[in-house]
């Protein structure tokens, strides 16, 4: 198989590239070359900025592909460009959408690919929906061979999967746990969530590559394991060898304190979700997510503790947590008096 990935070194894509190269795929990665140290051995680099359409057209002029996948398309204009570049150049174009595009708030927690797409809380999700609609239109009207993939919360060994964290990632939450400080869990921590290790995501994704039955289809790829946020934070604390001190705070209050949580909480993680992977399993017989979350979290914690570069300090988020927790506790005390 001859494939081109736009991106290819991120959380979702890195495990896919590694596995494909092990399988002997002729894999090209189109990126700006800023992370060449992370390129897997055997990948062929097409160095360029995907937003420079004329330059990219020159890079691929003599090439045709079995599969092209764009991991970094976020806006309608991105997929319009991709259509112009790859119509007639690939047998399959895979667009990475998002499970946050599904109806929010949900009319039913059980999600299939037939669940309506709507998210009034998060522009990111609305942009993904617009991308999907454009690509399906090109498929219906011009035969553009698109497959839409909707990941949910996918993680790897480089960052802990959390609900509430700062702009510099999840390490500061782990650091608070190690320092015996309270950490914030949104809501009461009992809403249901699904997290998928990128190794498992890769198995489903590769099974869709070159799959004629996936053309014109939208498919989500997630684990079948469902856990609560309380369980997730307990797993992290247990992997760190510490006791969890959780403070539960309304998602609406957190979104009011920091508008960044308007989308990521109210438009995503605050809602209970259970994914039905029947469609994926029909398209990719034998697919199974085999990394249990507590095992994956232990791997991630061990890896982060061994790599200081994955432990960025986020003093602003740390102070914000203290401030929010103090405000909630003060409000409770004032009402008790």
Image (tube, rainbow, N blue to C red):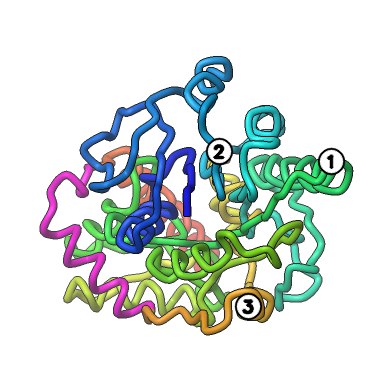
Q: Secondary structure at mark 3?
A: loop
Residue in the picture at 72% in, 41% down: 131
| Residue 79 relative to residue 155: left or right | right
Is 67 located above or below residue 134 in the figure? below
Task: State if disc 1 and disc 3 touch (CB < 8 Å).
Answer: no
Picture residue at 32% right of the left edge, 77% below the top: 235
Quarter-wise, where is residue 32 in the image?
A: top left
* Mark 1 neighbour class, 10 Å CA radius: few under 14, some 14 to 19, many 20 or more: few
Q: Nearer the viewer, residue 171 or 28?
A: 28
What distance separates the C-alpha of mark 2 from that of mark 1?
Answer: 18 Å
Image x and y of residue 28, in percent: 41, 41
Segment tinted magenta in the rendering = 293-312
Q: Residue at x 43, y 71 (%)?
A: 200
- The answer to whether residue 226 is seen in the rendering is no
What residue would you read off at disc 1?
A: 142
Towards the viewer: 324 or 186: 186
Q: Position of residue 65 (x, y in %)?
A: 54, 43
Q: Main secondary structure of the magenta part?
A: helix
Q: Which residue is mark 2?
A: 64
Q: Left of 170 or right of it: where is 287?
A: right
Q: Which label's residue is closer to the chain start, 3 or 1?
A: 1
Discs 2, 1 touching: Cβ within 8 Å: no
Residue in view at x 48 percent, y 42 percent? 4
Q: Nearer the viewer's eye, disc 2 or disc 3?
A: 2
Which of discs 2 and 1 lies nearer the camera? The answer is 2
Q: Earlier in the sequence, mark 2 or mark 3?
A: 2
**Label 1 element class:** helix
Label 2, label 3: how many angstroms apart (C-alpha)?
32 Å
Pointer 3 residue? 277
């Amino acid at each position: 198989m001859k494939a081109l990935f736009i991106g290819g070194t991120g959380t979702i894509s890195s495990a896919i590239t590694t596995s494909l190269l092990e399988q002997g795929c002729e894999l090209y990665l189109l990126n700006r070359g800023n992370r060449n140290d992370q390129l897997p051995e055997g990948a062929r680099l097409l160095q360029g900025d995907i937003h420079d359409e004329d330059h990219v057209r020159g890079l691929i002029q003599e090439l045709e592909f079995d599969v092209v996948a764009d991991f970094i398309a976020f806006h309608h204009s991105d997929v319009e460009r991709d259509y112009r570049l790859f119509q007639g150049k690939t047998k399959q174009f895979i667009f990475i959408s998002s499970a946050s595009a599904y109806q929010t708030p949900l009319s039913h927690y059980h999600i299939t690919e037939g669940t309506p797409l709507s998210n009034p809380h998060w522009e990111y999700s609305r942009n993904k929906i617009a991308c999907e609609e454009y690509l399906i239109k090109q498929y219906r009207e011009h035969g553009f061979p698109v497959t839409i993939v909707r990941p949910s919360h996918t993680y790897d060994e480089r960052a802990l999967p959390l609900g509430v964290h700062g702009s510099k990632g999840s390490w500061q939450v782990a650091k608070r746990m190690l320092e015996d400080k309270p950490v914030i869990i949104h809501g009461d921590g009992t809403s249901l969530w699904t997290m998928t290790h990128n190794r498992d995501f890769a198995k489903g994704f590769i099974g869709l590559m070159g799959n004629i039955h996936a053309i014109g289809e939208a498919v989500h790829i997630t684990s079948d394991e469902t856990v609560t946020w309380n369980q997730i934070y307990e797993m992290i604390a247990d992997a760190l060898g510490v006791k969890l001190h959780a403070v539960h705070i309304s998602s609406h209050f957190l979104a009011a304190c920091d508008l960044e949580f308007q989308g990521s909480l109210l438009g995503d993680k605050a809602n209970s979700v259970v994914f039905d992977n029947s469609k994926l399993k029909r398209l990719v017989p034998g697919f199974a997510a085999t990394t249990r979350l507590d095992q994956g979290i232990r791997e991630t914690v061990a890896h982060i503790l061994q790599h200081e570069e994955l432990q960025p300090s986020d003093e602003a988020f740390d102070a914000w947590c203290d401030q929010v927790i103090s405000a909630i506790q003060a409000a409770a005390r004032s009402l008790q008096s």
